[in-house]
Image: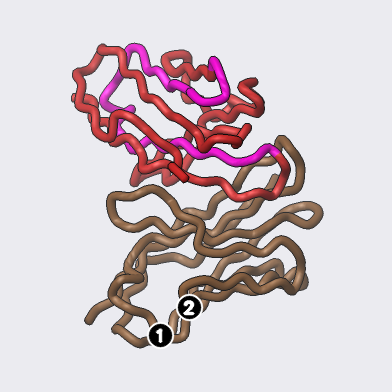
Chain colours: A brown, B red
Amino acid sequence: GDSVTQMEGPVTLSEEAFLTINCTYTATGYPSLFWYVQYPGEGLQLLLKATKADDKGSNKGFEATYRKETTSFHLEKGSVQVSDSAVYFCALSPYGANSKLTFGKGITLSVRP
Amino acid sequence: DAGVIQSPRHEVTEMGQEVTLRCKPISGHNSLFWYRQTMMRGLELLIYFNNNVPIDDSGMPEDRFSAKMPNASFSTLKIQPSEPRDSAVYFCASRRAEGGETQYFGPGTRLLVL
């Protein structure tokens, strides 16, 4: 079945550091890929998505590129801020009316001033 | 636009009591999902509906859990009787039924069963 694997956490960075969070997936066909973010005490929010190979999703300075050859969707940001401290989830969804999201375990990012 | 609305936001109850969680999806969305989040197990899909019909309830832990969607704008998740191991944050999410569309999450209900 479909699965998403995220790098182990937590991750602690200093403000303005470069961020990479790895995500790889296993799926049949061509799923859509997502990054969701969960701030403390809140629900998940869509951060960015990509629906086909080589697409780049971007939002709030974060980027991720759909790499079918490596089945990856790594999240990057050039300069993190304290306000980026949150839990980040990678997810995939196959195409179809009855499809559902498969989430990775999530990784906690803490950014120090 | 109002997002997904969940109530209550917090619930504290005693073991054995019935708990009902409520969700109002975004207007025009015809798929609805119930998730549970715990430290130990992460984010788990419990059940989801398309056009008010349950499609997959394989994630529902046991018979103590039940979910209904009587109309397009309302769903409930009921736990009867509740147990301490049911303590978790329960999220509702909605989306349009076409595949690949984004799910939009509510703020969650934090449940504590004593």
Q: Which residue is drawn at 31% across and 75% down?
A: A12
Disc ID at residue A61: 2
Task: Check the image and report above or below for A58 versus B13.
Answer: below
Tell me whether circle 2 and circle 1 mark residues in contact (CB < 8 Å).
yes
Residue B92 percent across, percent down from the top left? 46, 36
Q: Quadrant of the N terminus of chain A?
A: top right
- In front of the other: B88 or A51: A51
Q: Distance between the residues labelled 2 and 1?
A: 8 Å
For the point 50% across and 75% down, the residue is A62
Q: Residue at x 69, y 70 (%)?
A: A66
Q: In this view, does A110 lie above or below B51?
A: below
From what the image shows, is residue A110 above or below residue B35? below
Position of B76 with respect to A3 (left or right) is left
The magenta segment = B70-97
The C terminus of chain A is located in which quarter? bottom left
Horizontal side, residue A79 vs residue A99: left or right = left
| Residue A37: image location, x then y, percent | 44, 59
**Residue A112, how many percent across, how many down?**
24, 78
Residue at x-position 39% and y-position 25%: B22
Judging by the rendered image, the residue that carries numbered circle 1 is A79
Task: In the rendered structure, find residue B47 and report the number of the disc placed on it.
Answer: none
Amino acid type of the residue tagged 1 in the rendering: Ser
Q: Which mark's residue is nearer the viewer, 2 or 1? A: 2
Amino acid found under the numbered disc labelled 2: Gly
The picture quadrant where one finds residue B111 is top left
Q: Is mark 2 on a helix, strand or loop?
A: loop
Give the camera-side residue of B13 and A56: A56
Rate crowding at label 2 as few (under 14), some (14 to 19) or many (20 or more) other CA atoms within 10 Å: few
Chain letter belonging to callout 1: A
Q: Is residue A21 left or right of residue A38?
A: right
- Which quadrant of the structure image shows residue B55? top right
Residue A112 in the magenta stretch? The answer is: no
